[in-house]
Image (spheres, rainbow, N blue to C red):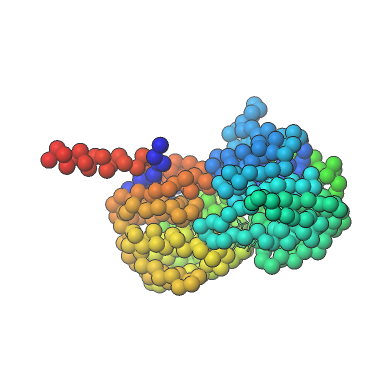
Amino acid sequence: MAQEIIVVHGNGTLAGEVQVSGAKNSALKLMAASILAGGECIIRNVPRISDIEVMAEVLEQLGARVERNNHEGRDEHTLTIDTSSVNSFETPYELVSKMRASISVLGPLIGRFGSALVAMPGGCQIGARKIDMHLKGLESLGVEFGIDHGYLKATTPHGLKAAHVVLDFPSVGATENMLMAAVVAEGVTTIENAAREPEIVDLANMLVEMGARIEDAGSSIIRVTGVPIGALHPCDHATVGDRIEAGTFLAGGALTGGPLTVRGIDPSYLRMAIMKLREMGCTVREGDDFVTVTREGDLRPVEIQTLPHPGFPTDLQAQFMLLAACAKGTSVITENVFENRFMFAAELARMGADIVIEDHHALVRGGCQLQGAPVSSTDLRAGAALVLAGIVAEGETRVHKISHIDRGYEDYVGKLRSLGAEASRELPYRNHRATIRVETEC
Ligand code: UD1
């Protein structure tokens, strides 16, 4: 069956309040961490998105039981994961190739069983996305790796031993895999140059609730005192709000003027994005768990460099490139985290944007009136930004390949409609057929 597309009618506005879902990038790792508990964990505030379904399949493949909303009083955003029956260490290529984050079962499988067999993740559209730091870090804890017909085979012939590890780059995935193995390594592990994303803190909090001993998660040096695997137990944990979803809606509010409020998010997770919105001429108000954006004058040009947290998130780069394209003046956006994350620029250019890419810099000459066009989501965040672009463009925009958006945004169209957008999910050929019929009638 043909994949649905999102059809957006332009010259629209976004205003009102929207509740953000739980963070995709947290929930996926919390699900993986449940392997270490060897019992029934409850994870709340889990978004209903396709990446979560893939991670559920990964866990089921390992022998776990994963259920949504199976007890009275638990809603559809609550997962119950029983990992007591996990009896396989193998994650097949079919699942890893669907979602690279499947690699995050590596650390917990090694932690619980001392072995793992995980298909090597392939490349990815937004860059090579190597896993060398995951492997180097785990090797220093005593893990031995071999390649077996496209699979990464991990063994721990002498058990897991603590180590002092310095990551070459604060990789989110490598820090997480290290953490999930180090919690049961004998001795005190130090992870230096660790990633500091709020999702790392969320994972560490859940591991601590399970009985792990972790200090200073959220700083660049994390200390982990290993405990025996038997000391870890199931827990009941709620996922933090999704700062990238929140940032996407805030960009939408900034684009059309708002006022737009995102709820369910700690504003401190969005420091740099909020700073850039202010630099671009927006008024931003922060509360305990909400952020409101309003804009009255023109959008101003900006300079943005993506960096690991607390720097500007690469996952908001496309959304802010769209803002820059609508600003009065020339902006410069530099992508430092992924080597190939400007595919969005070509799609936005199809809508009339003037963007020149030079290596990892984008020169965005703003001020154009975007025109509705058929466009394609090149990745998750680009897809979300193209829908926003359609809201301010002239005419109709048809966004294809929306399975990318479904990977990470729960009910994106529904939430945008609740804010006033004219958008809907449709099968791709409806208008095309209508055109042919009219021509025939003539
Ligand atoms: C996570 C997020 C993703 C976000 C990214 C950076 C999830 C599921 N995904 O991805 O949305 O954009 O953090 O904030 O949580 N690298 C290596 N070798 C390694 C590991 C990483 O070279 O072993 C490189 C990558 O190719 C990339 C950079 O380091 O260029 C950052 O990657 P990393 O922080 O690991 O991102 P992910 O965990 O893959």
Residue 197 located left or right of residue 164: left
- Tell me where residue 112 sits by quadrant: top right
Which residue is at the front of the view, 15 or 196? 196
Residue at x 39%, y 59% (from the top left corner): 347
Q: Quadrant of the N terminus?
A: top left
Which residue is at the front of the view, 221 or 37? 37
Q: Position of residue 227 (x, y in %)?
A: 85, 49
Q: Quadrant of ligand 1?
A: bottom right
Residue at x 71%, y 65% (from the top left corner): 167
Q: Is residue 82 visible?
A: yes
Residue at x 42%, y 63% (from the top left corner): 345
Q: Residue furthest left?
A: 442
- Tell me where residue 354 sits by quadrant: bottom left
54 lies above or below 25: above
Q: Is residue 289 visible?
A: no
Q: Position of residue 318 (x, y in %)?
A: 47, 60
Q: Position of residue 296 (x, y in %)?
A: 39, 61
Which residue is at the front of the view, 332 or 291? 332
Residue 200 located left or right of residue 371: right
Residue 423 located left or right of residue 80: left
- Tell me where residue 92 sits by quadrant: top right
Which residue is at the front of the view, 118 or 233? 118
Q: Residue furthest front?
A: 149
